[in-house]
Image (cartoon, rainbow, N blue to C red):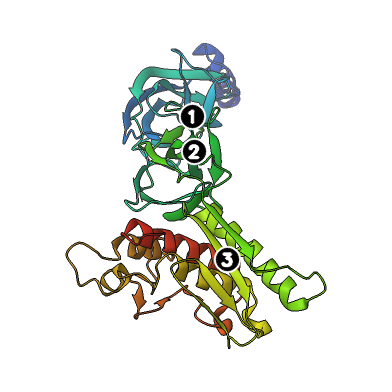
Amino acid sequence: MKTIEKITFFFPMLMLLISCSSDSINGETTGQEPPKETDLASLKTIEANEVEAFSAIILAKIEDNGGSSVKEQGICYALTSTPDYNSSKKEPNSFKGSGEFEVKLTDLSEGETYYARAFAKNAKGISYGNEVSFTTKTAVPPSFKMNDTIVSGPHDIWTDVELTERGEDELVEVGVLYSTQESFDLESGTKLKQEGLNSTFKYRMTDLEANTTYFYKPYAITEHGKTHYGEATQYKTLEQGNFTWSFNGTLDPNNENHQRIKEAFDTATWYYSNYTAIQKHVTVNYSPGTPTADANFDGWINMGANASYQRTGTAMHEMAHTVGVGQHWTWKFIIDNDDSYYSAARANAVLSMMTNGADTAMHGDDIHFWPYGINGAHEDTGDDFLYIMNALIVQGFKEDGLPSN
């Protein structure tokens, strides 16, 4: 009986010892597993797509994150080989679940070869993919068209420019350059900058020398700092006009009529001398009995006592008569356009160009023309453009065949 009790007691104790020592028997210990070692991420720069003048898309893929989450990734790029994290870089625009990502580079220069590598940054550090290279395209430049009609005085040239193609690069400035030298650029030419970036624009080159050939061309400056030039055109200013006047009798400084007439003709002859090539002398007579004013081709002008007509506009109107408007036999053929030799072609072209096509043809009768004929005191606004247009149109009639003397 005692033997059985000893066996019964010994067996559980033996099992307890076996269970407590089983790990050491198998040579194993319990506890946490050792940390895994982290590597650099591995990635691939796939290709450059959609390469344009100022942009390109780079495709890349992270093939293995190296056992650590990627904190930053993208494309580094440069104009020299082996770009790195300190070069220009940009993060992805889009991702795919497969690890692929896409980066659009938008600050490139045209016609340049770039080198690009994908990069990824994890806990271990920064790793790079293979290098790809690509060459950006040359941007389509802006193009211009010069209007065939050019208007000139002795000291001015007007021209119209059309921006027919704006080009691929954003424009920041457009204008016209001019010079008396055939070869010139932004640094050597005189610049007329356009206010705004419209597709059509008119330029007035002024303070020019009379009877002198000028060269001019449009230009455009792009957002990336490149200057493009249009084709150069040349045009010669008119000979200096010399339209003079004298008063019949003695100008009385205390006579208001005389002084208004003097001021009117001083101003009117200045316009005809500086916006036409006309050489003419007229004699102005104060004629109180004349209702308004009248003139003849011989150069005699009567000015009445009506103060409304003792102004610059009336003086220019009468001066136009003295150079043939309504006074010479060729006038009817020019204004009616009914003769194979005479027509108002040049005057019409000047009118259309200077008014941007708002008026395309001169009108008239046996004595007058319109618009800009200043046919009455009510049409004399005193506006500088009105006086310039009157002179330029009369010059146009001269080029159409109307004689001055």
- Mark 2 to mark 3 CA distance (whole Å): 42 Å
Q: Are marks 2 and 1 in contact (CB under 8 Å)?
A: yes
Which residue is drawn at the image coordinates 31% and 59% (left, top)? 401
Circle number at residue 56: none
Disc on the earlier residue, 2 or 1: 2
Mark 2 Cα within 10 Å, few/some/many (few <14, many 20+)?
Answer: many
Please say whether residue 44 is visible from this viewpoint.
yes
Tell which of 19 and 174 is nearer to you.
174
Q: Is residue 310 left or right of residue 259?
A: left
- Mark 2 to mark 1 CA distance (whole Å): 7 Å
Please say whether residue 38 is visible from this viewpoint.
no
Tell me the residue that label 1 is attached to. 185
Tell me the residue that label 2 is attached to. 177
Which residue is drawn at the image coordinates 39% and 72% (left, top)? 327
Q: Residue 60's x, y, as percent?
A: 37, 29
Please tell me whether residue 132 is drawn above or below residue 263 in the rendered image.
Answer: above
Tell me the residue that label 3 is attached to. 283
